[in-house]
């Protein structure tokens, strides 16, 4: 039977309809109240230490749990006080608690660079002593050696970060708002994914009524599953790590490596089973074709392509028997896959452009024909801002940012910074805002933009690799404004809440990160995930940051034009042939994600997708199952997050106790 | 236009296979195939977005 051709916009909007809520709200109220503000701050700051600790132990912060805990507490209190919680309040609570719990993570890069500056990799690549003082103090400074973010050595890095944060807030808020007005008000784009986010607050607002709904039941099931899983995966290693020098891991974190076991029949193949089965929940939510095609392609890559085509033809030549997953991935990457992936990334950029440019043409055509778009008039009481004011704020924010970067890297050509700031950023953001408005996701990205810029600028100092560049994208953030609109929350209340909570979070974030660093060195056996991953990341960062030095670095030598061309052209061919055969574009994103990847990292997601598709949808029906999904995921995250919070509390207390020898 | 786009994409794909299997995988030939494929993909998307008289339909949710 012939397939019907569907455009990408149709395809993704259909997907989004699964989560759609009825209509939209057109009456606006403030979501910011004193109880919301302090409630968010209380729960957010309570869970922030757990979230940071979890990210070092298991690689996942579990931060998603905090907003839901806050909402549950809030709705329960409302029920017992015989009052109701408004959806505006709940949405504000979700967003403020999310910001509060995530605030510690903003200082993670300080911990990373404090580790990186003293790694053997950074020393052997001769970059340890060239890392600028505005990134991290010197490796032998007291601030690094005593693991203290409160030491005066950190004043400059933290000061620069705060200046950037202030200017960033000006730019991001104003930039997003201007684009939202253009795409949502003027062009009337649908933002198909916004209802999914809005649904959380909408759903739980109902529960403060008299009747209990299915949502509590589903949330509780998710929470219990999260508690059990969290105890096995995070609780046992974290608690045993408090008492023993080597923590007990029921399931090895982050993976069980089968690479050496398969080398007999699949030399150069990789299979490391990722043990984080919480990933199953992603499988429930992600489109089935994406998960399936990703896994099948990854299996073919590791069991056919690598061992039986690339290895016999000596394209993969550095691998030797006995290599584990990390060595195999590194060797295969240097021999072939790194080059191939560069080409693949260019395809994603080109395909995104091919999909988004015709949309711009279509807009002009539709405007002429229908004449219904083109008005910047705003709904009453939405809490809008004057566009001219936002324009001025953006110019101040961006101008200040360019000046700051120029101060950090004075010899880097200013013309590149100005070009990025005032030409590239507006165009790039507008295109992304449009694709978010139509497809609910980003399509357009120029890969390796920084690297290309550094080559063109002929600037050879290493400091530019540590500096931010003003190539920004506010497009994705426009969706947040649409969610505010759907939940009926006034824009002014959202902005006021953000500005009020920011100073508190800046200070508390530094303090908590400091205390967690004091528990034990990061990485160390206390933090198995970072102990496993950060040395690899350090090697990769060294390779990347020295890639353009002297023109003969290891990574530049590893990049081969014919392999890059193979990645680029084969990906284009896959995309083109799927279009010719009328397959949905989802298959393309799955196949591209799976080529060269480790199938072991996808097993949990695949299980989730199969259970969802072949059992849950049949059992509950498509619409109902996809209504359950976000609530179930929230409950699970909540359970895992609670375990993380509990274990970090015990760890902090045990480290605070000084054992006397008598 | 749909057929034209399909033919160009198929030609591009065949060209790439030939460049890999019989021309030693030289990047010049591969990039030529990429150029052909790019033209085909752009035509395909322009046709998809701008074609007149597209029938209104509800896309089947078969995922």
Image (cartoon, coloured by chain):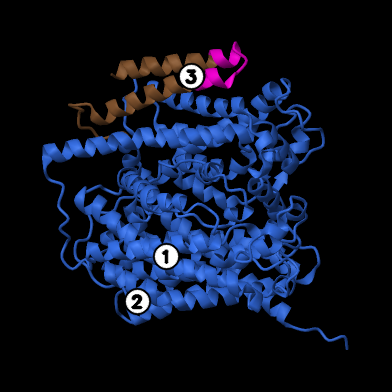
Chain colours: A blue, B brown
The answer to which of A430 and A252 lies nearer the viewer is: A430
Chain at numbered mark 3 = B
Tell me where residue A348 appears, x and y as whole percent.
46, 36
- Residue span colored magenta: B18-31
x and y percentages locating residue A188 in the rendered image: 21, 49
Report the label total: 3
Residue closer to the observer: A583 or A394: A394
Q: Nearer the viewer, residue A366 or A325?
A: A366
Q: Nearer the viewer, mark 3 or mark 2?
A: 3
Quarter of the image for residue A303 reads top right
Q: Are marks 1 and 2 in contact (CB under 8 Å)?
A: no
Q: Chain of mark 2?
A: A
Q: Which residue is mark 1?
A: A400
On screen, residue A94 above or below B48: below
* Residue matched to label 2: A79
Height in image: A23 above or below B37?
Answer: below
Q: Position of residue A133 (x, y in %)?
A: 63, 66
Specify whether disc 1 shares its chain with disc 2. yes
Q: CA distance from mark 3 to mark 2?
A: 67 Å
Q: Is residue A131 left or right of residue A453?
A: right
Instruction: Tell me if label 3 and label 2 are in contact, CB under 8 Å.
Output: no
Residue on which the image places disc 3: B32
Which SS type dominates the magenta stretch? Answer: helix
Name the residue: 34% across, 61% down: A395
Structural crowding at the residue carrying mark 1, measured as other residues with C-alpha within 10 Å and reported as few (<14), some (14–19) or many (≥20): some
Q: Secondary structure at mark 1?
A: helix
Would you say residue B22 sits in the magenta stretch?
Answer: yes
């Amino acid at each position: 039977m012939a397939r019907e051709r569907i455009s990408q916009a149709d395809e993704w909007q259909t997907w989004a309809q699964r989560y759609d809520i009825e209509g939209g709200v057109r009456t606006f109220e403030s979501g910011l109240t004193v109880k919301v503000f302090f409630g968010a701050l209380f729960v957010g700051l309570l869970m922030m230490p757990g979230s940071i600790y979890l990210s070092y132990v298991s690689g996942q912060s579990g931060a998603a749990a905090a907003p839901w805990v806050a909402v549950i507490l809030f709705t329960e209190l409302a029920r017992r006080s015989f009052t109701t919680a408004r959806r505006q309040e709940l949405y504000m609570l979700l967003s403020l608690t999310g910001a509060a719990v995530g605030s510690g993570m903003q200082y993670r890069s300080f911990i990373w660079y404090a580790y990186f500056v003293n790694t053997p990799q950074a020393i052997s690549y001769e970059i340890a002593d060239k890392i600028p003082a505005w990134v991290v103090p010197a490796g032998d400074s007291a601030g690094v050696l005593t693991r203290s973010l409160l030491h005066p050595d950190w004043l400059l890095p933290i000061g620069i970060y705060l200046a950037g944060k202030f200017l960033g807030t000006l730019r991001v808020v104003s930039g997003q708002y201007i684009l939202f007005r253009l795409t949502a008000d003027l062009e009337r784009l649908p933002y198909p994914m916004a209802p999914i986010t809005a649904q959380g607050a909408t759903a739980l607002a109902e529960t403060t009524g008299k009747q209990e709904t299915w949502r509590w039941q589903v949330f509780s099931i998710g929470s219990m599953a999260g508690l059990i899983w969290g105890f096995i995966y995070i609780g046992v290693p974290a608690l045993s790590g408090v008492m023993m020098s080597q923590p007990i891991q029921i399931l090895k974190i982050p993976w069980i490596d089968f690479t050496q076991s398969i080398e007999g029949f699949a030399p150069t193949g990789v299979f490391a089973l990722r043990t984080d089965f919480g990933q199953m929940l992603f499988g429930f939510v992600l489109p089935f074709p994406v998960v399936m095609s990703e896994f099948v392609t990854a299996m073919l890559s590791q069991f056919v392509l690598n061992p039986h085509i690339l290895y016999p033809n000596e394209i993969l030549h550095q691998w030797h028997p006995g290599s584990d997953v990390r060595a195999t991935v590194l060797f295969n990457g240097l021999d072939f896959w790194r080059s191939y992936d560069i080409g693949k990334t260019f395809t994603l950029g080109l395909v995104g452009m091919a999909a988004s440019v015709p949309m711009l043409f279509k807009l002009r055509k539709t405007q002429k024909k229908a004449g219904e778009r083109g008005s910047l008039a705003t709904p009453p009481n939405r809490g809008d801002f004057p566009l001219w004011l936002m324009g001025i704020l953006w110019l101040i924010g961006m101008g200040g940012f360019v000046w700051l970067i120029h101060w950090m890297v004075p010899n880097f050509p200013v013309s590149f910074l100005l070009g990025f700031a005032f030409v590239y950023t507006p165009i790039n953001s507008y295109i992304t805002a449009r694709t978010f408005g139509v497809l609910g996701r980003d399509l357009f990205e120029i890969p390796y933009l920084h690297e290309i810029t550094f080559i063109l600028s002929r600037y050879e100092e290493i400091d530019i690799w540590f500096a931010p560049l003003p190539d920004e994208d506010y497009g994705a953030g426009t969706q947040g404004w649409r969610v505010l609109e759907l939940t009926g929350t006034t824009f002014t209340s959202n902005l006021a809440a953000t500005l009020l909570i920011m100073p508190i979070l800046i200070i508390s974030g530094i303090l908590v990160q400091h205390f967690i660093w004091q528990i034990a060195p990061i990485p160390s056996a206390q933090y198995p995930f970072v102990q496993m991953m950060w040395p690899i990341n350090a090697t990769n960062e060294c390779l990347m940051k020295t890639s353009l030095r002297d023109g003969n670095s290891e990574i530049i030598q590893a990049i081969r034009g014919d392999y890059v061309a193979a990645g680029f052209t084969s990906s284009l061919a896959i995309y083109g042939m799927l279009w010719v055969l009328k397959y949905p574009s989802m298959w393309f994103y799955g196949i591209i994600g799976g080529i060269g990847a480790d199938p072991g990292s996808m097993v949990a997601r695949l299980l989730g997708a199969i259970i969802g598709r072949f059992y849950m949808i049949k059992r509950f029906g498509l619409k109902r199952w996809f209504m359950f999904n976000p609530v179930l995921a929230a409950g699970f995250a909540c359970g895992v997050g609670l375990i993380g919070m509990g274990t970090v509390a015990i760890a902090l207390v045990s480290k605070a106790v000084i054992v006397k020898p008598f | 236009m749909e057929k034209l786009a399909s033919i160009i994409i198929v030609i591009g794909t065949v060209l790439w296979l030939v460049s890999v299997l019989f021309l030693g995988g030289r990047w010049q030939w591969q990039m030529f195939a990429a150029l052909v494929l790019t033209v085909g993909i752009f035509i395909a998307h322009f046709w998809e977005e701008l074609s007149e008289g597209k029938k209104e339909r509800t896309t089947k949710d078969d995922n």
